[in-house]
Image (cartoon, rainbow, N blue to C red):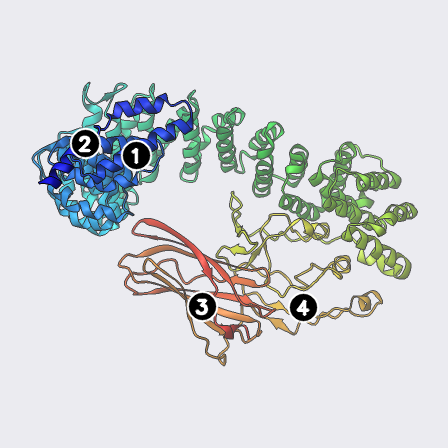
């Protein structure tokens, strides 16, 4: 008795904890952050003491104060167990604070939450609907996989009750459970269907959300719920035809939230199904014509209606109606609505181009909008609308936009104008004029690939060479500070300088130019500080070419080139030294080496270029991540300027199809190779057609001086490295396979075999299998290797993997390792399973040692 008396006396002497409102007042009264921390630390100490004393009287008050402290950002994890004790209390006020504390202080990663499963199960069977609701809300917020499996049966029973308050909370809780454990979906399918007939709009709303989630997760469930399309159409029709209801009215529209949810579900059910689409065509037309558009509420419904119409197999007239709705959105004063309309039209243009073309003038007007997001979407949509009939008017508007646009738009707009003109230009004269206009308007923002593309096109336009070279000479005479314009002009002057002097231009008054004027202009460009080294390489190359086209300016050309024989730039110095060597010792070869380039082949003519330019990705450490193509796609850099001068067709960011080869050091021989007209890295090979096997000759040792002295240049092509067309080595040593990836039921295995045509090449056969019960579709494997290797991804055998290991996808990967270094490969996987997309990436470094030998 003495011990109990002592405890009671201590408890009696302890001051009662202050109320929550008093704590808030004390914290707000603190003048500094240090004072606030002192108040909170003192209160936390008192709360801990009360928790140790197992004081049930003030536990609820202490936890409430602790939650406020937690919301201020201070640690409050020591109150987790007290929250569990509160939900076990019989009083509703205690349970309310306890469930609130669990929701804030716990999540599914904490093992403590397993202790509350039994309490929540008891509360779900309570007679008080508010206690049941608290338990359901808490479970929907923090449930884990284990809790979902343990309490799914209770949730199913609550879905069948007659209480609308409980049913709507149970439906949302079931949605969370389905997301956590899709296997439990079948349990809720029978209970979800009757919820759509409930009189409560809240129950209908949550039921539609639950059905939508299940349809997105399972194709079988989607097929099951397609039978409910007439029922959904009836519910939606009652909403739009019902009179005024103050309980559900929002700005004159009856329950817009439920309408939007039903439209979204109809879009999922009708996609790819003609029968379901036919059943909902009439109601979609009614919604599109009867919805009030003066308020944002109506615009939200119309937006969902448009998305539904464009996704399902709707009638052509209904699609035109949907595009017209988006056209009205473009005239709205609200910037958000205009942005949404442009974004949706951009997705719609591929489905119904003619309907979108009717609103072309309104879309073009959006280019003048001050909002940068609207301008970005408008310019993307304008490029999507360009075709052979409107190319002149659209490009005119886009060039006007280019003149006035911000620098961040110039690169994108100029590149896409180049592409649009290349595909749809009515004639070459107009094409050339437009390209030069773009070069002037975009200035230094024109990408390198556009420069090389324009040079290629000029090289094949034989009849326009006089007109082009004179126009370019006039342009750089006025302003030679724009790098892309100077690069194109310098290349053309170097190639067609003799045509420039002749003045043989039809339809225009020729410009009389002398050799001295041309050389003086090029000399000014070389001495300009505004031009970068690559542009000066173009100019220097033009001067070298003019030495064989001009007769009276040889001394002036030599005077211009002399200082560059000591230039700090190795490329400029090398060109000058080689020129003087040719002039003095091998002058009889100079005219042949510097003759006019033949018309260049367009290397990208068979390639569909993504409007975003995303053909190749580059990893952080410089590894090249290749998409799945028949040939490797290699980026080029600014250092390829000399190749551009000679018509290599290489640009700064243009994807170029090149065969895989063993790269050799070209630092010492690159200049002479260019003078000989050879493309470094590809030798004398002809480029193969896309998809054909590529046979790469081994690069022989070339004695460059023998070529200059008149002897034959050794170009023995008999020794070949067959990377794409080579056969497997039947006599290769057995190399053990490895598992490169195994996760979520997807397994990727590598099997190895040496290529019989070259010992430095290993053939890796990828085998992808699927042990899950679901079909895997859209399977894509991408890979990257360090720059010392060469990687080739062949086309896979397919993009779908049956479940249960019933089939596989195979893909051949060829890796050239000339330096016999350990192989390291980064990979990126993407696929769809059960209607959900998955993406994963990682690295494989455990390759067998025998593949390096």
Q: Nearer the viewer, mark 3 or mark 1?
A: 1
Alpha carbon distance from label 1 to label 4: 76 Å
| Nearer to us: label 1 or label 4 | 1
- State if disc 2 and disc 3 touch (CB < 8 Å): no
Q: Residue furthest left?
A: 127
Q: Which mark is residue 765?
A: 3
Q: Residue at x 50, y 35 (%)?
A: 380
Q: CA distance from mark 4 to mark 2?
A: 86 Å
Residue placed at 11% from the left, 40% from the top? 2
- In the picture, the disc for residue 44 is 1
Mark found first going from the N terminus, 1 or 2: 1
Quadrant holding the N terminus:
top left
What residue sits 66% from the left and 47% below the top?
A: 452
Q: Is residue 282 above or below residue 690?
A: above
Q: Are marks 3 and 1 in contact (CB under 8 Å)?
A: no
* Image-based side of 811 in relation to 10, left or right: right
Q: CA distance from mark 3 to mark 4?
A: 27 Å
Q: Is residue 307 left or right of residue 372?
A: left
């Amino acid at each position: 008795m003495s011990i109990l008396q002592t405890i009671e006396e201590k408890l009696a002497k302890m001051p009662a904890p202050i109320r929550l409102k008093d704590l808030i007042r004390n914290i707000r009264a603190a003048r500094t952050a240090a004072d606030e921390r002192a108040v909170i630390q003192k209160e936390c100490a008192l709360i801990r003491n009360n928790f140790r004393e197992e004081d049930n009287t003030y536990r609820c008050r202490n936890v409430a104060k602790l939650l406020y402290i937690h919301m201020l950002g201070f640690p409050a994890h020591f109150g987790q167990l007290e929250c569990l004790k509160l939900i076990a209390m019989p009083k509703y006020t205690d349970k309310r604070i306890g469930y609130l504390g669990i929701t804030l202080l716990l999540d599914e990663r904490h093992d403590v939450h397993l202790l509350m499963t039994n309490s929540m199960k008891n509360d779900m069977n309570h007679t008080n609907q508010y206690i049941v609701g608290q338990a359901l809300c808490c479970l929907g917020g923090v449930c884990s996989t284990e809790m979902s499996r343990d309490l799914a049966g209770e949730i199913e029973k609550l879905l069948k009750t007659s209480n609308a308050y409980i049913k709507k909370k149970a439906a949302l809780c079931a949605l969370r459970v389905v997301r956590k454990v899709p296997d439990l979906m079948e349990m809720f399918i029978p209970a979800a269907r009757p919820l759509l007939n409930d009189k409560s709009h809240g129950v209908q709303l949550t039921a539609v959300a639950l059905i939508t989630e299940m349809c997105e997760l399972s194709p079988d469930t989607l097929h099951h719920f397609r039978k409910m399309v007439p029922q959904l159409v009836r519910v939606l029709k009652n909403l739009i035809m019902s009179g005024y209801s103050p309980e559900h009215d929002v700005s004159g529209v009856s329950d817009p939230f439920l309408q939007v949810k039903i439209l979204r579900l109809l879009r999922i059910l009708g996609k790819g199904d003609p029968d379901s689409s036919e059943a909902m065509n009439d109601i979609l037309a009614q919604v599109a014509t009867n919805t009030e558009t003066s308020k944002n509420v109506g615009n939200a419904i119309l937006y969902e209606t448009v998305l539904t119409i464009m996704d399902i197999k709707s009638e052509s007239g209904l699609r035109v109606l949907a595009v017209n709705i988006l056209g009205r959105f473009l005239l709205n004063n609200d910037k958000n609505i205009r942005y949404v309309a442009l974004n949706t039209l951009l997705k719609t243009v591929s489905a119904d181009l003619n309907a979108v073309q009717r609103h072309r003038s309104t879309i073009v007007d959006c280019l003048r909008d001050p909002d940068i997001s609207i301008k970005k979407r408008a310019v993307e949509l304008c490029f999507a609308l360009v075709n052979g009939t409107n190319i002149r008017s659209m490009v005119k508007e886009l060039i006007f936009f280019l003149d006035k646009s911000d620098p961040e738009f110039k690169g994108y707009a100029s590149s896409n104008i180049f592409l649009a003109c290349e595909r749809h230009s009515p004639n070459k004269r107009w094409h050339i004029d437009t390209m030069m206009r773009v070069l002037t308007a975009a200035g230094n923002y024109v990408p390198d690939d556009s420069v090389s593309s324009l040079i290629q096109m000029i090289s094949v336009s034989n009849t326009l060479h006089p007109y082009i070279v004179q126009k370019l000479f006039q342009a750089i005479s006025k302003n030679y500070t724009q790098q892309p314009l100077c690069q194109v002009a310098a290349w053309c002057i170097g190639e067609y300088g003799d045509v420039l002097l002749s003045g043989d231009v039809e339809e225009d008054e020729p410009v009389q130019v002398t050799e001295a004027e041309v050389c003086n202009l090029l000399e000014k460009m070389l001495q300009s500080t505004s031009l970068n080294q690559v542009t000066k390489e173009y100019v220097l190359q033009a001067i070298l070419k003019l030495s064989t086209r001009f007769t009276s300016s040889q001394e002036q050309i030599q005077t211009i080139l002399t200082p560059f024989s000591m230039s700090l730039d190795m490329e400029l110095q090398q060109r000058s030294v080689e020129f003087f060597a040719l002039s003095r010792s091998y002058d009889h070869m100079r005219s042949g080496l510097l003759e006019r380039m033949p018309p260049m082949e367009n290397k990208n003519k068979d390639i569909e270029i993504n409007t975003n330019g995303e053909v190749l990705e580059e990893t952080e450490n410089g590894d090249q991540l290749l998409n799945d193509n028949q040939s490797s796609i290699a980026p080029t850099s600014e250092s390829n300027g000399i190749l551009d001068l000679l018509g290599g067709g290489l640009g700064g960011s243009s994807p170029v199809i090149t065969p895989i080869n063993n790269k050799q050091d070209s630092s010492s021989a690159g200049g002479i190779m260019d003078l000989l007209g050879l493309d470094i890295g590809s030798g004398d090979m002809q480029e193969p057609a896309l998809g054909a096997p590529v046979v790469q000759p081994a690069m022989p040792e070339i004695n460059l001086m023998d070529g200059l002295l008149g002897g034959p240049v050794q170009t023995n092509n008999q020794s070949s490295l067959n990377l794409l067309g080579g056969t497997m080595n039947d006599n290769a040593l057995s190399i053990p396979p490895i598992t490169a990836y195994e996760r979520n039921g997807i397994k990727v295995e590598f099997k190895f075999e040496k290529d019989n045509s070259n010992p430095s090449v290993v053939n890796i056969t990828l085998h992808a299998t699927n042990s899950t019960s679901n079909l895997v579709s859209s399977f894509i494997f991408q890979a990257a290797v360090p720059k010392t290797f060469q990687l080739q991804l062949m086309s896979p055998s397919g993009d779908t993997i049956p479940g249960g290991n019933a089939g596989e996808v195979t893909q051949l990967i060829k890796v050239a390792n000339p330096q016999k270094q350990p192989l390291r490969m980064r990979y990126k996987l993407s696929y769809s399973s059960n209607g959900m997309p998955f993406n994963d990436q990682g690295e494989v470094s455990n390759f067998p040692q025998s593949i390096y030998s």
